[in-house]
């Protein structure tokens, strides 16, 4: 019996390792437009893979296609966790080309950006349904977190039982209100950070390793 | 049916006029609606969030709640604890809620279903409802609520009137008013229904202007790949033979 048990244990260890190594978890970075998702994705990718994921911009809906950075290996406390980082387009319920006209964009470009942004939302929702194993939900801590989009997305993520971390981004800005973000989603852990300035990234990586490792 | 300041967490009894001119504590003007009683709210809300600028719950706990396992069972425990240790101002509020308005407590039972559905709506709507509730309470003991009253005044045909009278108590929101255990979070079913009633997954208002139904997008099997200006769009349909693009 002892022999059989040992054999069974070693087989399960090998299979566990095989699956663990071959399937890094896909972590989707979600959130409303302009929350700093791409800035965070780039920060993670630069820190651990020496590369960026996509262009950042202060104009909303800069990311209109999901972009993936594969095999990002994060080392924490002598352990390593390998993930695929998926930077998704900002999710919203309304897209209007007029909001882009303020950013020195002509109407034709603004209309095209608007259409692509809407396609981006569809893609983000598709990824959420099909392709992610965990979610980093990024919020701009200077903005009101009590929105229909945030409530709905967090609800969907919870209904899928996905591990989720709430990141209260832009803490470098004076009017950032971390507590308000934490109050909005008390059932989840909120991590404050500034992806732009690289503030509190140690805790960010600790939590990523803890939640998605 | 209390309200809570989303900024500092202060709770207000239902129909309170205090909140209409902003939170007396922090000046916040955004309030969260809670279908439960004010006692629940005072107990379940974080009694004193200020010292803890970065919330650091036990990582193992939050990990569990992240996997959807244990947040509801935890609430009752924190309820009793925090009731005992609640800051004095919260206690006075709770006392106010009880002593000030017994009719209000009774009213909480007969609170209309539309009111419950409002839990997910914007604070401006809540503020407006608070005024309506208040006036309704002051005016009469009639069972009908403000939403019904306004519907009644708008309806012309007697047939429609009957229909309007019949439907609200049976609608899904009344269920949520009864069984909404975790009052902190709006019911996802309500959101889903509300949005599904509005439109299909993507509505093109004008070129470059879109309204998006997130739940519909999430629920559908097809994946919308690209939109065309003429209102057509390309979808990817998963089927038994793999992935096919259709227009």
Image (spheres, rainbow, N blue to C red):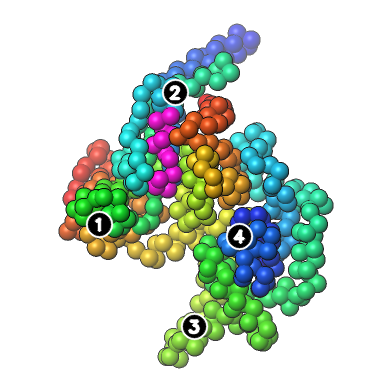
Q: Which span of residues is magenta-colored? A: A32-43
Q: Is residue B232 visible?
A: no
Q: Are the residues at dot 1 and dot 4 in contact (C-beta closer than 8 Å)?
A: no
Which of the two discs, 1 and 4, labels the residue nearer the N terminus?
Answer: 4
Return the mark for residue A47. 2
Q: Chain of mark 2?
A: A
Residue B145 covered by magenta stretch: no
- Say if residue B105 shows up in the picture: yes
Distance from Cα at disc 2 to Cα at disc 3: 59 Å
Q: Which residue is mark 4?
A: B28
Image quadrant assignment for residue B183: bottom right
Q: Left or right? Give the position of A24 relative to B51.
A: left
- x and y, in percent, of residue A115 in the image: 25, 51
Nearest the viewer among A92 and B156 is: A92
Q: CA distance from mark 2 to mark 4?
A: 39 Å
Same chain shared by disc 3 and disc 1? yes
Label 2 and label 1: CA atoms lie apart by 37 Å
In percent of width and height, residue A59 lies at 34, 46
Q: Is residue B13 above or below residue A156?
A: below
């Amino acid at each position: 019996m002892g022999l059989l048990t040992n054999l069974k244990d070693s087989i399960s260890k090998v299979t566990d390792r095989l699956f663990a190594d071959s399937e890094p978890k896909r972590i989707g970075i979600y959130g409303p437009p302009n929350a700093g998702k791409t800035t965070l994705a780039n920060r993670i990718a630069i820190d651990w893979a020496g590369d960026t994921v996509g262009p950042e911009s202060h104009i909303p809906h800069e990311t209109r296609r999901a972009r993936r950075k594969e095999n990002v290996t994060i080392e924490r406390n002598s352990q390593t966790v390998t993930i695929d980082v998926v930077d998704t387009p900002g999710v919203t319920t309304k897209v209007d080309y007029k909001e882009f006209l303020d950013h020195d964009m002509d109407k034709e470009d603004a209309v095209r950006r608007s259409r692509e942004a809407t396609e981006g939302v569809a893609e983000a929702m598709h990824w959420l349904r099909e392709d992610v194993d965990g979610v980093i939900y990024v919020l701009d801590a200077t903005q009101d977190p009590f929105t229909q989009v945030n409530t709905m997305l967090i609800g969907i993520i919870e209904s899928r039982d996905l591990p989720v971390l709430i990141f209260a981004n832009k803490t470098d800005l004076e009017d950032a209100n971390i507590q308000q973000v934490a109050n909005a989603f008390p059932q989840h852990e909120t991590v404050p950070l500034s992806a732009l300035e690289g503030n509190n990234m140690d805790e960010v990586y600790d939590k990523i390793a803890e939640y998605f490792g | 049916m209390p309200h809570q300041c989303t900024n500092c967490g202060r709770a207000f009894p239902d129909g309170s006029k205090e909140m209409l001119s902003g939170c007396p504590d922090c000046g916040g003007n955004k309030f969260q609606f809670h279908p439960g009683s004010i006692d629940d709210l005072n107990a379940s809300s974080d009694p004193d969030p200020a010292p803890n600028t970065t919330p650091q719950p036990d990582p193992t706990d939050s990990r569990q709640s992240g996997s959807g396992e244990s947040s509801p069972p935890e609430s009752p425990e924190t309820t009793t604890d925090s009731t005992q240790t609640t800051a004095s101002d919260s206690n006075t509020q709770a006392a106010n809620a009880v002593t000030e308005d017994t009719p209000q407590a009774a009213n909480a039972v007969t609170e209309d279903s539309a009111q419950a559905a409002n839990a997910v709506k914007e604070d401006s709507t809540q503020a407006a409802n608070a005024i309506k509730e208040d006036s309704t309470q002051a005016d009469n003991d009639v069972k009908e609520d403000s939403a019904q009253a306004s519907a009644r005044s708008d309806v012309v045909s007697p047939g429609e009137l009957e229909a309007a009278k019949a439907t609200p108590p049976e609608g899904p929101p009344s269920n949520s008013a009864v069984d909404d255990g975790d009052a902190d979070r709006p019911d996802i079913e309500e959101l889903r229904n509300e949005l599904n009633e509005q439109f299909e997954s993507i509505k093109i208002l004008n070129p470059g202007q879109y309204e998006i139904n997130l739940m519909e997008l999430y629920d559908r099997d097809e994946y919308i790949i690209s939109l065309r200006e003429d209102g057509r769009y390309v979808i990817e349909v998963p089927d038994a033979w793999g992935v096919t693009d259709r227009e």
